[in-house]
Amino acid sequence: MDETPKSSLLSLQPEAPIPTAPEAPNPIFLRELPKHDEKFRHALAHILLPVDLLAAYGIDPVTLRNKEGKVMVRTGHSEDGMIWALRLLNDIDPRDPLMEIELSDTPFNRIAVNWVAMNDPTAPRFNVDRMPDGSSTLRGTAQRNIPAEVAAMAAGLAPGQVRQGLRHLKRLLQDLEQVFALMGQYEFDIEPLYYHAAILFEHYGFRYARGENFMKRIHQGFQPDGGLYTRLDGSTPFRRPKMAHSIRGRSWAIHDGILDEPWDGVKMYKRLGVHAGVDTASGVPW
């Protein structure tokens, strides 16, 4: 006896395309989001929130509330509308969000990822973002809390990290691609603040708009006969010879100012669904 439900997909007539599928791209920019339906804006944010991560930290994956009924997601625009940010909070340690994303419109009619971070609230915290007097280090780019950085490095963290991450970055970047697809954007930009971040983005399929030769020169400089390697003289905790042999070690040495020029001007971009295959530090472990 055939028990196939009569309401199966085969019985749906006529078959039609998704009504919202555009015939041609109609890019949406961050400054335009406030004009769009609130449900659309909510859906964009929700795409970036993995349901298993929400559930693991006691956040309802539908309502985005904790057990006390508090909404644990914050989004906001800058006054000019050019910057949009999302923060996923937690009840374990409110000093750091589980997830933090900041996007911005660029002067070239593109969207850039300014910052993306994920923090394990159960892991030890290292105050690399604050000086002893409480002033901000701007993620270590304006001033440095050296004792905190030494402790963070010893714990296996990279420059800029206040805690161990959640190992969700690859999936977060994939989710960002879904968001940009909904916004009609084929590409998005990123400007890595640190050497290790640029290498991570290489692994996740990004291509250089500027700085690929610079990255290759850095790699050559850390070879045994390279100029950067000779500067790993032990003069600071971040300049020991072994730093040349890992991405994280190199990043700490660069953060410590070992280059002849400042870490600046490296720009990358990702085309949706395309892995660029760039590798400027082949064979170097994390």
Image: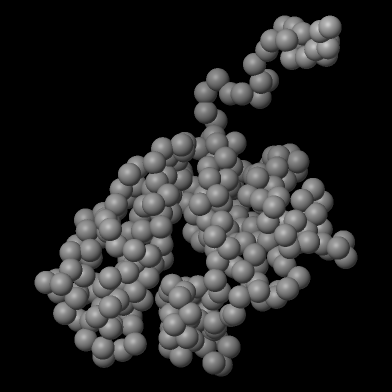
Screen quadrant of the N terminus: top right
Q: Quadrant of residue 149?
A: bottom left
Q: Residue furthest front?
A: 1
Q: Residue furthest left?
A: 225
| Residue at point 54%, 76% (across, down) | 162
Q: Position of residue 245 (x, y in %)?
A: 28, 70
| Residue at point 61%, 69% (across, down) | 120
| Residue at point 26%, 90% (across, down) | 235
Q: Position of residue 10 (x, y in %)?
A: 73, 10
Residue 268 visible, this angle? no
Q: Residue furthest right?
A: 68
Q: Quadrant of residue 130?
A: bottom right
Q: In this view of the protein, which residue sits in the foreground, 80 or 1?
A: 1
Left or right of 114 in this view: 283: left
Q: Position of residue 176 (x, y in %)?
A: 55, 46
Q: Position of residue 19 (x, y in %)?
A: 68, 20
Left or right of 77 in this view: 115: left
Screen quadrant of the C terminus: bottom left
Does 158 appear above or below 101?
below
| Residue at point 36%, 58% (across, down) | 199
Q: In this view of the protein, which residue sits in the foreground, 27 or 50?
A: 50
Does 25 appear above or below 150?
above
